[in-house]
Amino acid sequence: MDKSLCMSNGLVQTSRIHVNICIALWSLTFTFFFTNFLLAQQEFEEPKKLVIVDFGMNLGINTGVFKENISHKTFGLHTGVYFQRNPFDAYTYGGHLFYNQLGSYHVNFIDQAAGGLELREVVSSHVLGLMAAFRLYPDLDIGKMKMYVHLLFGPKILYATQSLFDINREFIDEFDIIHGSVSLSYGGGVGVNYPIMRWLQINARWDFIPGISASYYRKLDEIPVTDFAIDGFEKKNSATDMMNFSLGISFFF
């Protein structure tokens, strides 16, 4: 084989190697600077203010005189919306709403005037909290768990309802609010968020919510034989101190 031809082929191969090395170096250089450019752009983007939305369930335990009158555990639901004033603030503010049922009793009877219609009368006692809320996130994270302090102030509305059902159709024929009172309340507690996704987190919290004296319906421990559901209750008046253990989810927008 011609020696000059071999040298020519060697030079071509060497040139190709050099070209490939140059392309690789340019690619790496471009990737490095482009990635840093994107990161820099993200750093200069204005941070967004957080909006937090809560949903969950409550386990209520009354305390003090309120527990003497209603000693059993109560169950209910809660929701809340919280807003961050500035993107870097460690606190949010908003509203917290909770509902617990305090007791319920029903009787069935035949309404002869309505042609022997079978009806059910239900009387229930409830508490509804409409609270202004303040939530502070101190720098007390435990692993992925983010701790917070929760402060509450607002009215607890204690009310009783009376409903009349057609048992066969399960249809509400009548509904009345037969009692209502307001207990100005305050308090707070501690909670924790645990992330499932960036925008979705488990939310667990304990709140202690004392309240000034108000009237409410208490379900009797021993209910006499009666044709009227209201006879299963007595009216009480006391402070409305209670604790709520809450478990739910929080959406971070």
Image (tube, rainbow, N blue to C red):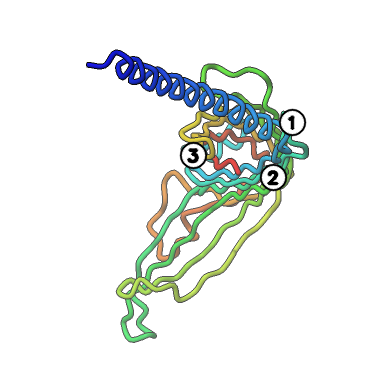
**Residue 216 image position (x, y, % from top left):** 61, 50
Q: CA distance from mark 1 to mark 3?
A: 25 Å
Tell us which disc is closer to us: 2 or 1. Answer: 1
> Mark on residue 88?
1
| Above/below status of 162 relative to 158 | below
Locate the N terminus and report the quarter of the image it occupies: top left
44 left or right, relative to 172:
right
Tell us which disc is closer to us: 1 or 3. Answer: 1
| Above/below status of 46 relative to 129 | above
- The type of residue carrying mark 1 is Phe
Compare residues 122 and 205 and report the one nearer the observer: 205
**What residue sits 26% from the left and 16% below the top?**
2
Q: Which residue has dot 3 on it?
A: 248
Tell us which disc is closer to us: 2 or 3. Answer: 3
**What residue sits 59% from the left and 64% below the top?**
178
Mark nearer the N terminus (2 vs 3): 2
| Residue 236 seen in the figure | yes
- The type of residue carrying mark 2 is Met
**Residue 218 image position (x, y, % from top left):** 54, 48
Within 10 Å of the Cα at label 2, are there few (<14), some (14-19), or many (20+) other Cα atoms? many
**What residue sits 68% from the left and 54% below the top?**
181
- The type of residue carrying mark 3 is Gly
| Residue 185 seen in the figure | no
Mark nearer the N terminus (1 vs 3): 1
**Residue 46 image position (x, y, % from top left):** 73, 38
Within 10 Å of the Cα at label 3, are there few (<14), some (14-19), or many (20+) other Cα atoms? some
Within 10 Å of the Cα at label 1, are there few (<14), some (14-19), or many (20+) other Cα atoms? few
195 left or right, relative to 252:
left
Compare residues 246 and 112 and report the one nearer the observer: 246
Q: Which residue has dot 2 on it?
A: 131
Compare residues 164 and 129 and report the one nearer the observer: 129
Determine contact: label 1, label 3, CB under 8 Å.
no
